[in-house]
Amino acid sequence: MGGYAIETSGLSKSFRRVRAVRDADLHVPAGSVYGLVGANGAGKTTLLGLVAGLVRRDAGSVRVLGRDLASGEAHPRVGALVGAPAVYGRLDAFENLMNRALVLGLPDPVRACREALAAVGLSEHTAGDGRARALWPRGDYVEDLSTGQLQRLGAALALLGDPEVLLLDEPTRGIDPSGAAALRDLVARLARERGVTVVVSSHDLAHLGRICTHYGVMRGGFLVRELTADELADACSVRLTLRVDAPERAVATLAEELPGLTVRVLPDDALVVRAPGGGEPDRTVLARVLLDAGIAVSELSVSAPDLEGELTRIIDGREDASADGEKGR
């Protein structure tokens, strides 16, 4: 399926005097892994809740898998882990999954529950497994599970029924590093092998950088920017920063002698130079061209790509100042 799996227009939600989501226009391509990022309180959980039908909207529209949804309506092909998972504390993990599987009317609920538990790494001792007895061996009560185990159970619940869209809000919260890596790999595999569209919010930008094909950045309830992984990579490509005694003449010289380079001037008259394709500009050639033109280079430094740093800069709003400050001449 092409186009957008999720599309919203003017989506808004307030809680009393707090405007949690403001006029959000979200575009999630089908089959993508879309990372929703932002500081605490930016509106990520509320936005996911609106798309999942868990929160009624004040204004705007939500379209999922080609279908316009009413306020508070959940699409049957969407699996969601938004906020704390809705579970029964005095049942074990397997029983909670079975309850959900039976509501969904799955043809082989026991098998589906076992597969979901295995996918998120919950042990049989903790979860129960549906073997023997009139019902199944009991695992630990859900109310006694750790935060990480509860998050795994929430992910398992979201996976039941082979959804076409997954909405995951901080899915690795409280999970140990190896478990977080396994869940990250599962998300990537679902998108790659099954074409599942995944929207995942997280503060772990390094993890998102390994799996996301697209990003949405939230700030103060607004969805301030959407970009692809390639666009993010371009924004944080290797660049040279240098200082010269004649910035204006240096820009003109480089444009004439090395036309493939992108050269920008910062407010303090430092030059930022990028090469096509994100590679590192040849410092030797660049310095020679400037020196041959009689332009003295007093400082030259290299900055390596940093996806996490660039995302943090966008989240904090510092990309706006940079865009205004870097001006081509």
Image (cartoon, rainbow, N blue to C red):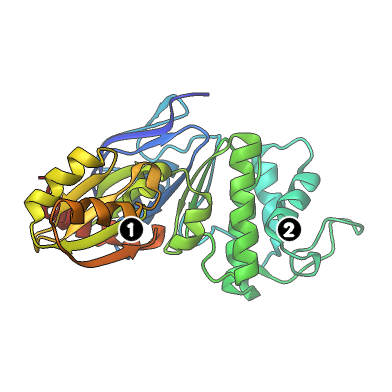
Instruction: Tell me the crowding category of disc 2: few under 14, some 14 to 19, or many 20 or more residues within 10 angstroms, Cα based.
Output: many
Question: Which residue is denoted by mark 1 in the rendering?
Answer: 310
N-terminal-most mark, 2 or 1: 2
The residue nearer to you, when weighing 221 against 271, is 271
Which amino acid, by three-letter code, is at mark 1? Glu
Find residue 247 and report its horizontal and vertical position in percent: 10, 55
Residue at point 72% right, 56% down?
117
Which amino acid, by three-letter code, is at mark 2? Phe
Q: Is residue 4 above or below residue 188?
A: above
The residue nearer to you, when weighing 185 against 303, is 303
Q: Is residue 251 above or below residue 269?
A: above
Question: Which residue is denoted by mark 2 in the rendering?
Answer: 94
Disc 2, SS: helix
**Left or right of 249 in this view: 21:** right
Residue 137 placement: quadrant: bottom right
Residue at point 84% right, 59% down?
136
Label placed on residue 323? none
Residue at point 68% right, 50% down?
99
